[in-house]
Amino acid sequence: MVKIAPSILSADFAKLGEEIKEVESAVDYIHIDVMDGHFVPNITIGPLIVDAIRPITDLPLDVHLMIENPEHYIQAFVDAGADIITVHQEACPHLHRVVQQIKQAGVKAGVVINPATPVESIEYVLEDVDLVLVMTVNPGFGGQSFIPSGLNKIKQLFDLRSEHGYSYEIEVDGGVNQDTAKQCIDAGADVLVAGSAIYNKENRIEAIKAIKESL
Ligand SMILES: O=C(CO)[C@@H](O)[C@H](O)COP(=O)(O)O
Ligand SMILES: [Fe+2]
């Protein structure tokens, strides 16, 4: 079963609670993009907002940290109610340690790779992680175009999982819409993150349906 994770980055932040409630019945995770203005050029939200969202939904909160020194903020996001915390390989010189830190804090640990980062760079944490996120845009903004080279990485991760019996989910993020979703699923993705393809549409449930029907 394909999972859908709407990215609230493209939602209306003035009515975030309603925007989450609107899609809740049709999706599997709520994807939350945390940006610090250093690792990526944009600044978005922090643990306070995650804490505010937590009582709104029982869906897993999938927190994508696009920040430098993510190890300093893991506990704050766990306390705020995150269920999955995903850190960038490029932001973590001690990636193995950060993955262990996330797991020890009692939540699922994910690792993300940017479009220019190869799967080989995370080879030694694949046995430890619950989720691998393949970026198909350069992180920082919603509404960018899908970079197709991520599809090979999804395939590679799919094959490595079968070969070694790893248990991570493969998630894809960036430019996912009804034209690109099928390629991601065919390559082996389990979870589709979609921001503008859902929240920039008038009828969000119809938009989610359109993505599912395109598969
Ligand atoms: O992490 C990010 C961007 O850095 C994403 O989660 C975006 O929010 C996805 O937006 P769309 O490309 O689906 O509009
Ligand atoms: Fe994201």
Image: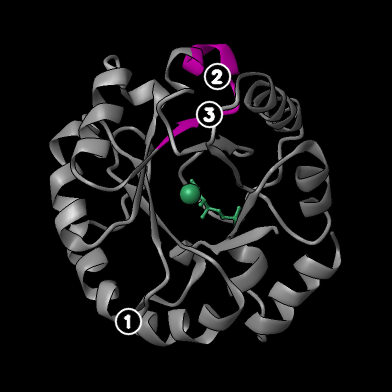
Residue 209 coordinates in the image, percent (x, y): 75, 76
Residue 86 occupies quadrant = top left
Give the residue number, with chain letter if any, for mark 2: 117
Which residue appears at 18% of the width and 61% of the height? Answer: 80
Along the viewing direction, whichever of 28 and 30 lies nearer the viewer: 28
Q: Is residue 214 magenta?
A: no
Q: Residue pushed farthest front? A: 165
Mark identifier at residue 56 = 1
What's under tag 2, amino acid-wise?
Thr
- Disc sitting over residue 66 in the figure: none
Name the side, left or right, on which 27 lies relative to 37: right
Mark in the foreground, 2 or 1: 1
Task: Note whether 169 is above or below 197 in the view shown.
Answer: above
Secondary structure at badge 2 equals loop
Q: Residues within 10 Å of mark 1 (few under 14, many from 20)?
A: some
Q: Is residue 111 located in the magenta-colored stretch of the structure? A: yes
- Range shown magenta: 110-123
Tell me the SS state at disc 1.
helix
Q: What type is the residue that disc 3 sits on?
A: Asn
Tell me if I can see residue 30 in this picture.
Answer: yes
Say whether mark 1 is within 8 Å of ligand 1: no
Q: Nearer the viewer, mark 1 or mark 3?
A: 1
Q: Type of residue at label 1?
A: Ile
Label 1, label 3: how many angstroms apart (C-alpha)? 31 Å
